[in-house]
Amino acid sequence: MNAYSPHAFTAPATAGTIGFAPAFPVEPRIAPPVRRVQLVTVRQVALLTAKQRVLWVALGFVFVAALALLRVGIIGLSGHAVAATPFDEALLPPRGEIVDRNGAPLARAFPAYSLWFNPGALGEGEAALIKPASQVARELKAIFRDLDAAKVMRQLSAGKGAYLRKRVLPEEANRVLRIGELALEMPEEIDRHYPQGPMGAHILGYVGADGHGRIGMEQVLDARLRDRAQLTRPAELSVDLRVQGALEDELARGMRLVDAVGAAGIILDVDTGEVLALASLPSFDPNRISEANVGYMFNRVTNQVYELGSTFKPLTVAAGIDAGTIRDMGRRYPANPFPIGGFTIKDLHPLGATLNTPEMLIHSSNVVTAHMVREMGADRLRKVMADLGMNERPHIELPAKGFPLWAKGEWPLLRGMTVGYGHGIAVTPLHLASAYAAMVNGGIWRPATMHKLAPGAAPRGRRVFKASTSARMRQLLRTITLYGTGRNADAPGYRVGGKTGSAEKPGAGGYKKTSLVSTFAAAFPMDRPRYVVIAMLDEPKGTVASSFQRTAAWNAAPIVGRLVPRVGPMLGVLPDDKRDVDISDLVPLIPAAQKKLAAGAE
């Protein structure tokens, strides 16, 4: 082969050689296919995107759940509801709920049926009813046993639209439909319901046909209960439903035993002024307002003023101790009747020639009380009574508040003497409860309230008695239940102290000898008073149950004696026979106490 032939072979360049090129053409290197790699990458991206989306959805659910838990936590921990959402608004009732201090429902709104007579249901010019009105009335009477058939027949015959009945149950509505009268319509309405029936009726009041509250806390809280922004949070009262039931039960029992025409009672926290229970009997059912029970809506505790008799004597003694005119508990005062200003001040029964202060309270002497007022001065007593709020309407949120019968201007001595033993002044039982709270709690008067107070939220009040005076009065009140007219109120282990009061009711031409108001004002436990209890009976009779006696020692005091053991444990006061207020310095001054000790020693 020629060396110059174009087909001559040229050796390939070796490493490190320069300028040599292959003698034959070399094809360019082609990259491998990339389609499989691209497909794998797309799948990875799609999988990553799906995972991210799932993660975001999960985070969304976690966020919503966290918000829900936060909402529940705020409500549970703070006790206050958060703002209602539009969805919540649709579920809210038209009127807020009322609950007791423990959250038990007292008043709430719920959907209910009513029975309405629509005379135009069959059209203009047509008869209102298919059947005779008398027959329809009889058929309705068969469904609603307490229905007045004659009244319903008159309403049906009148041809005018009218409510025949409120609060129709679903099963009753079905029976009404089976009557077959199109004019008997049953519209669904929002009804106000009181789950406890008549219990606490004078506290709650009721809601009228116009949707506004009447006479009780329904009236006081009307604007708040109708405020849409506050419907998620119930209105809390100071009342304890359990204590309220016990008070009403014992007052009703006391009324029956002595055939009284009425009764009133209150249980008050001595340190805060919170009303734990308040009852006026006879009562009414706010679920069934009618002309028959309108007269029972009068509140004897806050609206009726009475001369409360000897329950004022401890207040007079406290005023004398504060004034410095009563220093020595053993000092003896004249106890014989004496004339003044054309009247003779005397006791119901002769109590001896002289009495000391503990004996005066134990035997309830008008004469000795009058001598104490003489030394103190009527003006001093008047100021103390005014400081206790006896010259103005009682301080409480309830709208029905009676104005006391209070003598204006300076009091002459005779007026001061009679007020000293509970005559010549008329106040409500609530006035008396607030005064006793100040007398035993260390001397601070505070207004009563129907609202539940937060810890530490009690009003400061005003000082009326010295703390030392209050301590002495706790001793004296305890001696009355141990050795005096209050023995029937002494509940073992609860250290009750209190005072009876029996006053004749005023009438035309003077006082009615046969009509009494019997009251027992008490506090417990006297070594550390926490609650005041007032029980009052209007016109009790002498019966077998009261040993044919009409005074408070035999009818009002036993009510307290039965009530305190019932409500004490509910209020955190347990019986303890090993504790009591120290009255050792008073025992030597009380013959009855010495006799009891001597009998025990034997």
Image (cartoon, grey):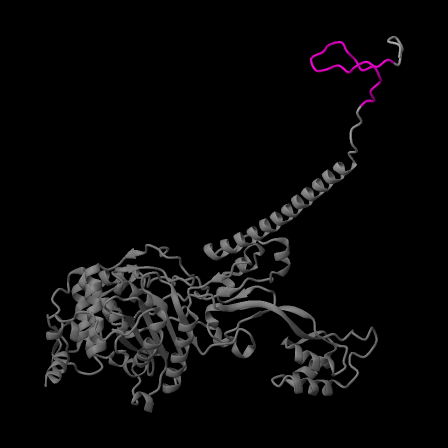
The x and y percentages for residue 396 are: 41, 62
Residue at left offset 39%, top offset 75%: 264
Left or right of 468 in this view: 409: right
Looking at this view, name the residue that lies furthest to the front.
1
Looking at this view, name the residue that lies furthest to the bottom.
544
The x and y percentages for residue 303 are: 42, 69
The residue closer to the viewer here, 276 or 124, is 276
Left or right of 297 in this view: 494: left
The x and y percentages for residue 310 are: 26, 74
The x and y percentages for residue 580 are: 21, 71
The residue closer to the viewer here, 175 or 418, is 175
| Majority SS type along the magenta span | loop
The residue closer to the viewer here, 531 or 514, is 531
Residue at left offset 57%, top offset 53%: 65
Kindly tell me whether residue 388 is visible in this rendering: yes
In terms of image quadrants, where is residue 30?
Answer: top right
In terms of image quadrants, where is residue 322?
Answer: bottom left
Vertically, is 443 above or below 539?
A: above
Residue at left offset 61%, top offset 65%: 210
In terms of image quadrants, where is residue 14?
Answer: top right
Range of residues picked out in magenta: 8-28
Kindly tell me whether residue 405 is visible in this rendering: no
Q: Quadrant of the C terminus?
A: bottom left
